[in-house]
């Protein structure tokens, strides 16, 4: 099991950048991760903020700079808010996204194993009676 986890980690870490900017994750699964990573929810109030908000693509994490500082923003178009965080929050977000992906793959593998074991034992109806 440990080697299987190492293989998954090796395959997913280079792809973690793709996970974070992909719209396929969906707003409902991305926003809790952003909040857990320390991103702040901001409503654009000034005309400059509204202009920047209008330019952002919806439901994607975007990198930007302001006065030499790197920041990341995620636009929730439906709610009219943006999740904003710095480099540290973005790194934590990436880590959480990879951990969630690994957990999802482990859960799916466990479900497949359970399904296979039920089919295997179901092929031998008298099996349970003899040994239990």
Image (cartoon, rainbow, N blue to C red):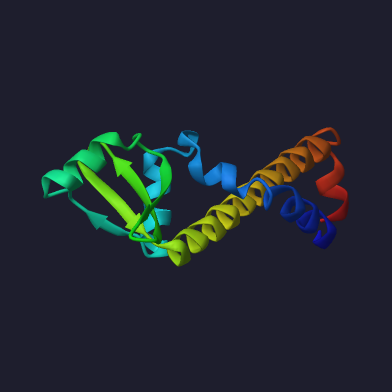
Q: Quadrant of residue 59?
A: top left
Work out which residue is located at the far left of the displayed protein and give it: 46
* Placement of the N terminus among the 4 image quadrants: bottom right
Q: Is 13 or 96 nearer to us in this picture?
A: 13
Residue at image point 18% right, 50% down:
43
Residue at image point 75% right, 44% down:
113
Q: Is residue 34 left or right of residue 20?
A: left
Q: Quadrant of residue 4?
A: bottom right
Residue at image point 37% right, 60% down:
85
Q: Is residue 5 left or right of residue 106?
A: right
Picture coordinates of residue 35, whole percent (x, y): 36, 59
Q: Is residue 99 above or below residue 82?
A: below
Picture coordinates of residue 106, whole percent (x, y): 67, 51
Picture coordinates of residue 15, whole percent (x, y): 65, 45
Q: Is residue 22 above or below residue 89?
A: above
Residue at image point 46% right, 59% down:
90
Picture coordinates of residue 51, whole percent (x, y): 20, 39
Q: Is residue 23 left or right of residue 42?
A: right
* Placement of the C terminus among the 4 image quadrants: bottom right
Q: Quadrant of residue 99?
A: bottom right
Count up the numbered dots: 0
Q: Is residue 37 left or right of residue 20?
A: left
Q: Is residue 24 above or below residue 94?
A: above
Q: Is 68 or 29 nearer to us in this picture?
A: 68
């Amino acid at each position: 099991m440990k080697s299987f986890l190492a293989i998954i980690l090796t395959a997913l870490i280079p792809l973690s950048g793709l996970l974070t900017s992909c719209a396929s994750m969906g707003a409902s699964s991305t926003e809790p991760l952003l909040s857990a990573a320390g991103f702040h929810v901001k409503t654009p109030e000034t005309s400059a903020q509204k202009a920047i908000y209008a330019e952002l693509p919806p439901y994607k994490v975007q990198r930007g700079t302001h006065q030499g500082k790197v920041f990341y923003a995620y636009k929730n178009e439906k709610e009219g808010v943006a999740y904003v965080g710095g480099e540290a929050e973005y790194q934590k977000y990436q880590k959480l996204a990879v951990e969630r992906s690994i957990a999802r793959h482990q859960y799916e593998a466990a479900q497949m194993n359970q399904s296979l074991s039920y089919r295997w034992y179901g092929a031998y109806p008298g099996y349970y009676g003899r040994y239990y």
